[in-house]
Amino acid sequence: MSRVIALVDGNNFYVSCERVFNPALERRPVVVLSNNDGCVVSRSDEAKALGIRMGVPFFEIRPLVGSHGLVWLSSNYALYGDMSRRMMALLGECTPRQEIYSIDECFLDFSGVPGSPSTHGREIRRRIHQYLGITTCTGIGSSKTLAKLANHVAKTRNECKGVFDWAELPAAGQAALMGNIPAGRVWGVGRKLAAQLKRMDIHTVLDLRGAGAARIRRNFSVVLERTVAELNGESCLALEDVMAAKAHIQATQSFGRPVTELGELREAVTTYVIRAAERLRGQHSVCTRVSVFIQTGKHRPGTPCHSPATLVPLAAPSDDTRRLCAAALHGLERIYRPGYRYKKAGVMLGGLQPMAAAQAGLFTAGQPSRAARLMAAMDAINKTYGMNTATFAGAGIEQPWRMKSMRRSPRCTTSWRELAIASA
């Protein structure tokens, strides 16, 4: 039995999440900006029509606010993450097997599911829009690479109405369509690789599909050879039922203003450790080392630069926020130098191990799990009542260094204080 794989993704996901709770944004050019309101990370179709590119600095497009009614919003990651979890939970009910690929993308295995795959795709699209208000597109193929490419077709061709299945096209139609899509649109073929392919006279998806395995193997890696096989309908990439645990966990952010005092840097580093440690426990891991770095700005001529980093090993693997904070702050004091204007800081938890397999230290073996119960209680409180409901004093209260979010929308689904208000 041949495989049938679907890729479902949310269109302009961050903007779509904003529109769910603010219908006044519909049919208007909208962009969502990155940390500190720096660059564009999501665009509505109307914003794309104005020629706004992904990643463009906001100051370059600010004139469009007055001339074309462009709406700009600060990123609201709490909202986007929660809406993603809801969407993935709904998609998980549609088929027996699911692989969550990113915050807005998900592979589904339709193999053996009765009925037409495209009918399932349309039902999924209808259901997600009805339950969450988010518009999706579904691409269907006999491999993950073909499903990803089909999703691109579904998103860019109006006649598809958001769903496209390669199997519904005859072989000649598939070839004609692939001949009109640049090879750079294929999953895993980036800009640099696309340029190399062009030098070999491989310009379109059809060209890449027809490239011989021996030729690809001779000039590129086995990864691209596998991609070519997938374009020819051979399924080489398995669906991952469970997301693989991360090899390291990083939390980093730019400051809203330059920071010179060690006290404020301590607050920022503590905040980032708290965030990283929650994710560490969320994947049931412990870490063996903590890295910390601080950076000055890079774009001020004449301003002295200082970008040190250090690594602090732990005596025993841990997921206890208190121990990780102590290690990170020890590292921070080691690398901090007065007189510099720091613009960014971050921490990385490394040497990750499964919690169940972690080896206890000489002086911690057999001790009661009081720390584990404390961390579990804090995580449960924050999950129920919102992020940072229970936190550590070392993170500070006012946090004058935190990033700018001048136009962040309410966190309608994760904060009791910011629930949407309905007027009857």
Image (cartoon, rainbow, N blue to C red):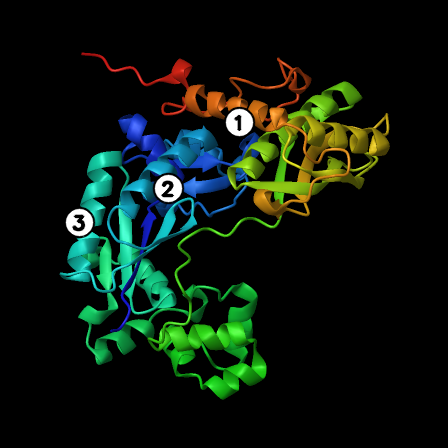
Give the CA distance from mark 3 to mark 1: 39 Å
Please name whichever residue, 227 or 200, is drawn nearer the observer in this view of the structure.
Answer: 227
Left or right placement of residue 240 versus residue 223 in this view: left
Circle number at residue 376: 1
The x, y position of residue 99, in whole percent, is 38, 53
- Quadrant in which the N terminus appears: bottom left
At mark 1, the secondary structure is helix
Q: Residues within 10 Å of mark 2 (few under 14, many from 20)?
A: many
Q: Residue at 38% x, 50% y: name it.
A: 105
The x, y position of residue 77, in whole percent, is 47, 33
Vertical arrangement, residue 112 with respect to residue 321, above or below:
below
How many numbered marks appear?
A: 3
Which circle's residue, 2 or 3, is located before the other in the chain?
A: 2
- Quadrant in which the C terminus appears: top left
Left or right placement of residue 162 versus residue 232 in this view: left
Residue 163 location, quadrant: bottom left
Residue, disc 3: 123
Which circle's residue, 1 or 2, is located before the other in the chain?
A: 2
Circle number at residue 135: none
Residue, disc 2: 13
The x, y position of residue 95, in whole percent, is 25, 53
At mark 2, the secondary structure is helix
Which circle's residue, 3 or 1, is located before the other in the chain?
A: 3
At mark 3, the secondary structure is helix
**Would residue 306 be seen by someone viewing this image from the given angle?**
yes
Left or right placement of residue 80 versus residue 362 in this view: left
Residue farthest left in this picture: 115
Contact flag, marks 3 and 1 (Cβ < 8 Å):
no
Q: Amino acid at mark 3?
A: Glu
